[in-house]
Image (cartoon, helix red, strand yellow):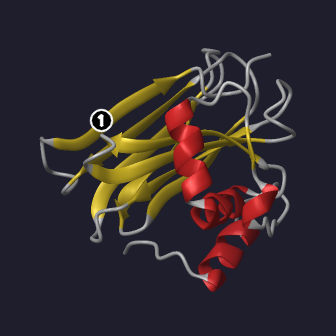
Amino acid sequence: MGRTITTAAIALAITAAGPFATSSHAADDIRIGPGVDAESAAYAQAHPEKVAAMANLCGAEYDTITLALRLPTDTNRLGTLWVYGGNGAASDQNTCSMFDNNTGGAKWMKLQLCDNFTSTPCAVDEGTFSSYAGPVWQKPGGCGTVTALMKSSSSSSTYLINRVAKNVTNCN
């Protein structure tokens, strides 16, 4: 069973998000963080409603986009990897990530968000999803990584997307 983004689904996902407060970010509430590459900034500015929807799934403290990466390429987009921080992505803020399925059909997806501390487990969401994997959260520290994987099915040996982005968690 995949996820479909609707107002009810967003509200449910936010409520189920655990210790993170609910959010109702408007499209113009989300800031583009310092150090965001030009491609991510341009994509975020061109898709403000999607930026706000993904931030709402992360929770109230996530008001700054730090990555909006079209995968596997700009011209062949099967997914979008989103990373958010809070308070202008300050170094003491948590990190949240979402992996948007842009294929129009259910795919096996894995989203993994890690800091660089070996004692901290990575946050992971994986399964067959029609809309997105995540959200996953990580506490600040270590300039960590986010991994986005997508295959046609869990048993497939061929990845449609296999991407690791480094230095995505807030560094402290």
The residue lying at 37 percent from left, 57 percent from top is: 127
In terms of depth relative to the viewer, which is nearer, 78 or 149?
A: 78
Whether residue 151 is visible here, answered yes or no, is yes
Q: Looking at the rendering, which quadrant does residue 91 occupy? A: top right
Tag 1 residue: 162
Amino acid bearing label 1: Asn
In terms of depth relative to the viewer, which is nearer, 103 or 106?
A: 103
Image coordinates of residue 69 in percent, x first then y, are 46, 41
Left or right placement of residue 37 versus residue 163 in this view:
right
Image coordinates of residue 37 in percent, x first then y, are 56, 29
Q: Quadrant of the N terminus?
A: bottom left
In terms of depth relative to the viewer, which is nearer, 29 or 145?
A: 29
In terms of depth relative to the viewer, which is nearer, 55 or 133?
A: 55
Image coordinates of residue 30 in percent, x first then y, are 76, 53
Q: Quadrant of the C terminus?
A: top right
The residue lying at 59 percent from left, 20 percent from top is: 167
Image coordinates of residue 45 in percent, x first then y, are 61, 52
Q: How many residues crowd mark 1 within 10 Å: few (<14), some (14–19), many (20+)?
A: some
Whether residue 122 is visible here, answered yes or no, is no
Vertical side of 97 occupied by 26: above or below: below
Vertical side of 146 occupied by 172: above or below: above
The residue lying at 56 percent from left, 60 percent from top is: 47
Badge count: 1
Q: Looking at the rendering, which quadrant does residue 161 occupy? A: top left
